[in-house]
Image (spheres, rainbow, N blue to C red):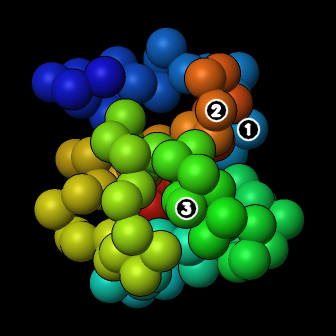
Amino acid sequence: MDGLRAEELLGVLANVPSTEMPRDRVAGARICDLAAAAGVCGSRGEARRLVQNNGLYGNNRRVAAADAVMADTDIVDGRLVIFRTGKRNFHLVKVV
C-alpha cells in the first residue's frame, strides 16, 4: 500500500467497511481511541489489547504502542487512514 494515492486505495478497497470522520477528530488523536471511534474495534480496551498482541495496523504499519498518536502526515493524501486487524480485516477512515 505504500506509494499508492488515496484515489487508488479507494478503488482497490471499495468493498471495505468505512467511516467518515472530521480531520480534527483524526489528526492528533490516539490511535486506539480513533480505532474504537471508527468501529474498527469494539472498545478502546480491545484496541489496546490488539496493540499489545501486535494485531493492529494503521496504513500498513504495526501500531507499536497503545499511546501512539495519529500524526497529520499519517493521513494518506490528507483524506484516508487504513486500519487493519489480523491478516485480512480492513477498515477505511475517510477524513472529511
In this rendering, which labeled residue sits more in front, label 3 or label 2? Answer: 3
Residue flagged by tag 2: what amino acid is it? Gly
- Which residue position holds label 1? 17
Task: Answer left or right for 45 relative to 22.
Answer: right
- Circle nearer the N terminus (3, 2): 3
Residue 65 visible, this orientation: yes
The residue closer to the viewer here, 33 or 16, is: 33
Residue 27 visible, this orientation: no
- Asked where in the image residue 4 lies, by quadrant, the reply is top left
Task: Answer left or right for 58 relative to 39.
Answer: left
Residue flagged by tag 1: what amino acid is it? Pro
Task: Answer left or right for 31 relative to 43.
Answer: left
Q: Which mark is drawn over residue 92?
A: none
Quadrant, the N terminus = top left
Q: Work out whether 91 lies above or below 44.
A: above
In what element is the residue under mark 2?
Answer: loop
Residue 57 rendering spot, x and y as whole percentages: 46, 45
Rounded to the nearest angstrom, the CA distance separating label 3 from label 2 is 13 Å
- Asked where in the image residue 13 lies, by quadrant, the reply is top right
Rounded to the nearest angstrom, the CA distance separating label 2 from label 1 is 15 Å
Find the residue positioned furthest to the top: 12
